[in-house]
Amino acid sequence: MKNYDHIKIEKKWQKYWDANKTYNTEAISKKKKYYVLDMFPYPSGAGLHVGHPRGYIGSDVYARMKRMQGYNVLHPMGYDAFGLPAEQYAIEHKIHPRKAVDINVKTFERQLSVIGLSYDWSRKVNTTDPAYYKWTQWIFLKIYNSWYDRKSDKARPITELIKLFGKSGNKNIDAVCDLNYTQTFSYKEWNTFTEVEKQGILMKYRLAYEGYALVNWCPKLGTVLANDEIVEDKDGKAISERGGYPVEKLSMRQWFMRITAYADRLLTDSEGLNWSTHIKEIQKNWIGKSEGSEIEFKTSINRNIKVFTTRVDTLFGVTYVVISPEYENISEFLVRSKNMADVSVYIREAKERSKKDNLDQKEKTGIELKGITATNPANGEEVPVWVADYVLAGYGTGAVMAVPAHDERDYEFAKKYNLPIKEVIIEQVNSRHDDGILHDSGKFDGLDSKEARTKITKEVDGKFITKYKMRDAIFARQRYWGEPIPLKRDKKTGIITTLKDKELPLKLPNVTSYEPTGTGESPLAGVNAWVKAGYETNTMPGWAGSSWYFLRYMDPKNEKEFASKKALKYWDNVDMYVGGQEHATGHLLYSRFWHKFLYDMGFVPTKEPFKTLKNQGLIIASDGRKMSKRWGNVINPDDTVKTYGADTLRVYEMFMGPFDQAVSWNTDSIIGSRRFLDKIWRLSLRLNKKSSSKDIENILHKTIKKITLDIESMNFNTAISSMMILVNEMEKDKIVSEKDFKMFLQILAPFAPHITEEIWEQLIRIDNYESKNKKQFTSIHLSIWPKWNEKKVIDDMVKIVVQVNGKVRTEIMISNDANEEDVKDLSMKDKDIIPWIKDKEIKRVIYVKGRIVNIVI
């Protein structure tokens, strides 16, 4: 083949790899394992654009090198096909979600295949496959039937909690439960409770539980959205990320996952992960751990207001107390206020605003509860009580002690409503938020903030507690296309029972109408047989199946368990995980939570699912926007592959810029990557059995070293740049050694797998023609990664710093094997050094080999 025909070559080798199962993984091997994984994608109906493959190509380059380095590589692919994206596509195109998913999967898989990605397709999983979601349901039931024991700091079966209740009640049990749950009971009382009462109590402790909550309701999409599925429009209003539809706040029955039980472990265990500081910081801020004090203000209506504060040292600076419009006991305050009518109107309007606005209000508003005061427990001072929309019912206790001199939000509110501002902390370094020394604080004057927090909390009979900004995760959707929740509810008693293992999977029923009802109920609520059986009508959220899929890849055909202990022990966890940083507060937290639960229960051997995480940057369209059908700026990879070839696309996407940074697509620039491959093709036609020049050999071995280290650190752009330099030097040389060129092909192979495989085969064919010892063809991708010769990566000349009395005066170049006396002599004869030592007594000359000469005068 004289010309580089990318279409013919790529089709040939994709067919060969598939037929020969080149990339299939050994289930259990004597080889060391390496698990390389892309974040679970959903198969979009729109298909891929050229921005999508960037992460897939990057992980593929990495996996290919690891395979050539002798590892048993697990590099699988599958589909996260339940949830909103697939369902919306089905609704828009008026086809059943199952059919939509099947169509989209075929498109997605075809597009991935033409790019030449080295996936083991035999391990493919799909969240919509009942054989897969059987285990999603199984894990859910394990979570539902568990509680979190603070003493052992782990999850335990709910049956153990029931036994403890029966023996000693709940007084001495330190468990994570509902924030507002305070009931205590003895073992005698527990044994007298009805089954309904017992189930109600246990629901307060379960790690998967039912309750009501203020949620992000999107009427147009007909479902609840997580916070990370919401964005702001140009006016700052909350809208759905998908579709841009209005989102409002609504109180609804939901299922929840008690992820807050794992908050501390999610924080502390992240320190040992090889993740970017940026992602760790995002998760840390999302969890929002706050250590502070919980204290009570008595009120003039004999109803205490409990507040949580991290700045109890400012207690003497409180000038008013604020409760949320959705405060739990607000009705008791409302009926006792002298301006009840005005407060009622305010509360109603505030609730309406909260449906439309994001949680961070643009302008703080409030109203005083006339005739009601609160007593400061530190000094007995009475302060007014206000209702204000800058206090959230879901954070802390739904009430705050306002200290406008030392809190920005309180300060803005106090200035707006002309409320007193009392400073009680002095000697602050920067602003009102800093610690300092107390004054105007009674007997605590002169104490520093840290010491005062402890003493004041004890003085007012407060409690030291830890709060988290992160809330329990909503685990329910009012939609059809999702995993059924495997629970049944008795219509008469309301008692919930779990399905037995042998009853799993609970499959989705076939329905004629799968569109959202718009009433807040799932379409399953309209399926008579489903409702009659007592099944839960909400379905699982989109993140259910993606919270454990990486474990299923380890043993995807197992019908008896989600993965065997042998497979789990061998594969351990994901060594390299690649995906977008936008999943930091969603998928990455949820999957860590599920994994830790499975670890607690003894089902997995590791505490964390992903050892190393790398985030790829976006590919931006040439118009500066994110690629989207909405903007009409999508570049289809099929077109690029057809015109320039898959290898060209792969090389270009890795060469565009640093892997973790956003880059702009430029179709005109891709020709440079094609020309690079054309050069390689031409070089392969003039190879020589003779040795390359010493210079070429040195550059080659330096390049091998650099490529190896660059792929390891995912600096793909600099790796390709180095190969381009090497090819240019080879092109200039009269002799291009076949032996050296083969080594070059091996380091290029992860980036351009098709052209390298073709040339590799041609060279073996030529060798067989010329030799009596015929070689059997082995794919270049199963060959051994080349090692560099250390002697050939050392430069002949090195740069030496020359100092006079410890101060740098110049630099000189010396031969790498120069002896000490020659280096000292050369240094003192340098034109830049002579003026500094002329007519001076040289006391000694110090030489640090290969680095520094210091002349002491």
Image: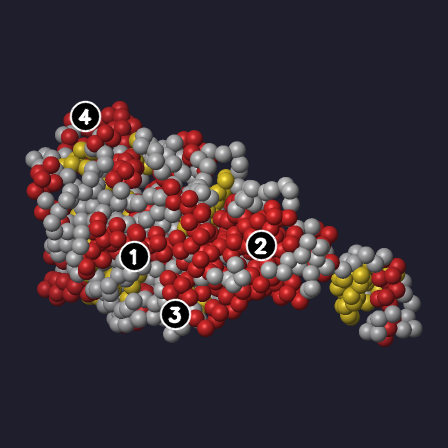
Residue 652 lies, with reference to residue 451, above or below; the image says below
> Could you say which is closer to the camera, residue 236 or residue 687?
687
* Element assignment for label 1: loop
**Alpha-carbon neighbours of circle 3 within 10 Å: few (<14), some, or many (≥20)?**
many
Residue 422: image location, x then y, percent: 35, 65
**Which residue is painted at 53% across and 38% down in the image?**
32
Residue 138: image location, x then y, percent: 28, 35
Q: Amino acid at mark 1?
A: Ser
**Distance between the alpha carbons at the discs numbered 2 and 3:** 32 Å
* Element assignment for label 2: helix
**Distance between the alpha carbons at the discs numbered 1 and 2:** 35 Å
Q: Which residue is mark 3?
A: 621
**Distance between the alpha carbons at the discs numbered 3 and 1:** 19 Å
Q: Which residue is mark 2?
A: 745
Residue 185: image location, x then y, percent: 22, 32
Q: Are marks 4 and 1 in contact (CB under 8 Å)?
A: no
Residue 408 lies, with reference to residue 88, above or below; the image says below
> Foreground mark, 4 or 3?
3
Residue 825 falls in image quadrant: bottom right
Q: Which residue is mark 4?
A: 191
Residue 200 falls in image quadrant: top left
* Residue 576 can be seen in this image: yes
**Distance between the alpha carbons at the discs numbered 4 and 3:** 66 Å
> Could you say which is closer to the camera, residue 697 or residue 604?
697
Q: Are marks 3 and 1 in contact (CB under 8 Å)?
A: no
Q: Which residue is mark 1?
A: 44
> Could you say which is closer to the camera, residue 450 or residue 278?
278
**Alpha-carbon neighbours of circle 2 within 10 Å: few (<14), some, or many (≥20)?**
many
Q: Are marks 2 and 4 in contact (CB under 8 Å)?
A: no
> Foreground mark, 2 or 3?
2
Q: Is residue 562 shown left or right of residue 716?
A: left
* Element assignment for label 3: loop
